[in-house]
Amino acid sequence: MISISLCMIVKNEEQVLARCLDSIVDLMDEVIIVDTGSTDATKEIAAKYTDKVYDFAWTGSFSDARNYSFSLATKDYIYCPDADEVLDEENRGHFRKLKEALLPEIEIVQMKYRTVTEFNTVLNIANEYRPKLFKRLREFTWVDPIHETVRIEPVVYDSDIEILHKPTSMHSKRDFGVFERLVRNSGELSPKLLKMYIRELYMTGDKVDLSNAEDYLVNISDTTMDVDVKKSVDGVLLKNYRLNKREYDFMKTFAKAIVNAPCSETCMEAGLFYMSKEDYGEAALWLFNAVNETESLIDIHTSGDVALENLINCYMKLGEGYEDLMAMAKQKLKDWKLPEESAII
């Protein structure tokens, strides 16, 4: 049986920390909690479960804090939950069996991640695999019978363990501050972080968040050679201009966005724009396109339930003559559910 160090970073998690630890602590051989500046009872709660509670001065980087927590581990594997995660009894059983039978060559174990509260920020699928359990010390192995080389790709196992993500609030404001600081300091984001920033802005950003990102996004839109990135950025800019009632900028960006095949986000924003003008016929046209003629690049809901709800509202406003279209949209909404898999990464 393998031994496991739990390594968690926390800040002001008094509402959820005990719930998380109660669901997993008996499966761990070591519990390490690194606090990055709590001002509530987080550290006192943590101390009830372990004497390995450490302070870490926040550097603006979650990676720095996680690297420090990992450096303190001493067991075979490291499990890294967030404080708002929970394992139910069924998945505790799956975890116990995994611990008893995990093959030593496995270096990373992925677990299914499912958000079960209304505070679902950036998930576009019902479940997604995330790496959660890591071998602490990696053993290098030579492979291939000729022209041999050291295996550099990790051995990954997709487990049947499902982690329940139960946040009690949005973390977007915290994340936006990190993104904005990175842009100020370096002038750019990695492709991965850019996609995450675009997604969080579109799905959870308010007028201030969108305005703060505008200059950076305009530059990306003007310079990127990646068509999907450009479409995604333009979708965020359209939301910014719509919410901040900048009609000229909205129409200018929208005209450029539909030269190429638009995405669902573009059509959704056009629909919401025309709804704000009480032009429900034009709004319905674009919302219909969002659902039936285009694909989402950022937010799966723009081609699904949210677009359908707004489309139905438009048909209700339009009234007589739209009954059949409304009935079809209502049936489609009834049948819609968050997909198990999505092309949106």
Image (cartoon, rainbow, N blue to C red):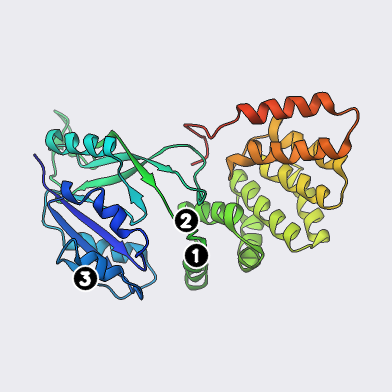
The structure residue drawn at horizontal position 62% and vertical position 44%, both measured from the top left corner, is: 227
CA distance for labels 1 and 3 = 26 Å
Percent position of residue 47, x then y: 20, 67
Which circle's residue, 1 or 2, is located before the other in the chain? 1
What type is the residue that disc 2 sits on? Answer: Leu
Q: Which residue is mark 3?
A: 54
Query: Which of labels 3 and 2 is toward the front?
Result: 3
Say left or right for 12 vs 120.
left
Q: Give whichever of 148, 317 is nearer the camera.
A: 317
Circle 2 crowding by C-alpha within 10 Å: few under 14, some 14–19, many from 20 = few
Label 3, label 2: how many angstroms apart (C-alpha)?
28 Å
Q: Amino acid at mark 1?
A: Phe
Task: Please tell me the numbered disc located at residue 193.
Answer: 2
Determine the residue positioned at 48% across, 52% down: 191
Among numbered discs 1 and 3, the one appearing first in the sequence: 3
Q: Which residue is mark 1?
A: 179
Q: Is residue 56 above or below residue 222?
A: below
Secondary element at image label 2: helix
Secondary structure beneath label 1: helix
Along the line of sight, the residue nearer the viewer: 255 or 326? 326
Task: Find the distance from the CA under tag 1 to the CA under tag 2.
Answer: 8 Å
